[in-house]
Image: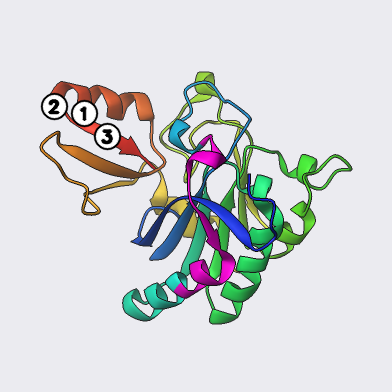
Amino acid sequence: MANDNRLISVGSFAAKTAVMGPGRRACLWVAGCDRNCPHCATPEYHRADANPLSDVQAIFDRVLRAKDKYGLEGFSISGGEPFAQAPALAELCRLIRPLGLSTLCWTGYRESELRGSAAPPGAADLLAELDVLIDGPFVYEQVCGDLPLRGSGNQRLRLLTDRYCENDFADLAGQFEIVNDGQLTDKNQLVLRGVIDIEVFRTITDALGITVMEK
């Protein structure tokens, strides 16, 4: 795990996506998570030491370029577990919000845990920079595809500011993107972005002989 408050262990980055929150957004998938939720959709992001470190300023510069190029509405953070790197991500969001972009973050923690005495270092600082939090561990037995931006029914959409209302998320239920990101190969490798009923999607892609990297 990155131990410098200006370094982030990066899983991947998308300059533009339409399924990781309201409007067009840049999205950062961080690497590093020890929660080990069964059937996690992104196990490739569990190990922080297997992914590159990037400086907060370098990621901000990528978001700034994407904003100018694509007219972004916001910035989203997934993973991995973002709150394992809360201090650096809080600093990143402090730079991003003055651009007029909204901020949204997924976490396997419950909001009450993040505000409690045993919260990860920097949790309060990151929460203070977020407009939206989607909290709670992924629970395979409660998997669903009809709740906006939530993979299982126990997870909650927390509006931390008045930037959005719940209706702003209604159209995001069950949406996903399939993109090649320059990675399309003779093995038909594609990239999936979004939050859907993953078992249904795997059934379809297995039947088609498609290997999917889930993000």
Percent coordinates x, y for residue 206 in the rendering:
21, 23
Where does label 2 land, which residue?
Answer: 208
Percent coordinates x, y for residue 112 in the rendering:
79, 42
| C-alpha separation, residue under disc 1 versus residue under disc 2 | 5 Å
Considering every residue shown, the one lying at the far top of the view is 141
Label placed on residue 105: none
Tell me which amino acid carries mark 2.
Leu
Tell me whether circle 1 and circle 2 mark residues in contact (CB < 8 Å): yes
Tell me which amino acid carries mark 1.
Thr
Tell me whether circle 1 and circle 3 mark residues in contact (CB < 8 Å): yes
Considering every residue shown, the one lying at the far right of the view is 117
Q: Which residues are magenta?
A: 46-61
Percent coordinates x, y for residue 38 in the rendering:
53, 21
Give the SS element for disc 3: strand
Tell me whether circle 2 and circle 3 mark residues in contact (CB < 8 Å): no
Tell me which amino acid carries mark 3.
Val
Left or right side of 11 for 134: right
Disc 2 crowd rating (10 Å Cα; few below 14, some 14-19, many 20+) is few
Left or right side of 45 for 32: right
- Name the residue: 16% across, 21% down: 207
